[in-house]
Amino acid sequence: MSKTDKELAVEIAKSFIEAHSVKLAVASNNVKHQTVGITLDSVNKIIESVHSTLQKLPDEK
């Protein structure tokens, strides 16, 4: 069974969140800091953008 455009958009957003989660980074001067995560607004925009793009693709035959 194929997935809906909404399901695919959510899966892509989940992957984006995992890839951009907060991580510890070490600068060249050995100072540790956290990287910036993404906001809920960013996640919503990702879902909307991917869903919109998937809706514009031609149907498979």
Image (tube, grey):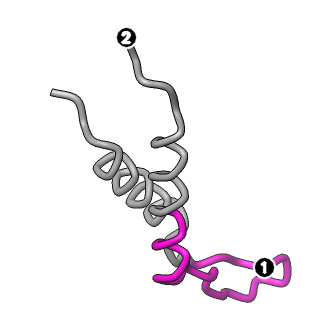
Q: What residue sits 48% from the left and 72% below the top?
A: 43
Query: Alpha carbon of mark 2 to alpha carbon of mark 1: how far?
Result: 51 Å
Classed neighbour count for the residue bearing mark 1: other residues with Cα under 10 Å, few (<14), some (14–19), many (≥20): few
Q: N-terminal of the two: label 2 or label 1? A: 1
Judging by the rendered image, the residue that carries numbered circle 1 is: 27
Q: Secondary structure at mark 1?
A: loop
Q: Is residue 36 above or below residue 4?
A: below
Question: Which residue is disc 2 drawn over?
Answer: 61
> Image point 15% across, 27% down: which residue?
1
Amino acid carrying mark 1 in the image: Ala
Residue 60, x across and y down, in percent? 40, 17
Q: Secondary structure at mark 2?
A: loop
- The outermost residue toward the left is 1
Magenta segment boundaries in residue numbering: 24-46
Q: Position of residue 59 (x, y in %)?
A: 42, 24
Could you tell me which residue is drawn at 52 percent across and 32 percent down?
57
- In this rendering, the answer to whether 45 lies above or below 59 is below
The residue type indicated by label 2 comes to Lys
Closer to us: mark 2 or mark 1? 2
Near mark 2 (Cα within 10 A), the count class, few <14, some 14-19 or many ≥20, is: few
Nearer to the camera, 35 or 2: 2
Residue 4, numbered label: none
Rendering coords of residue 58 (x, y %): 50, 26
Residue furthest right as drawn: 29
Examine the structure image and report whether residue 30 is included in the region drawn in magenta: yes
Question: Along the horizontal axis of the image, is 57 left or right of 15?
Answer: right
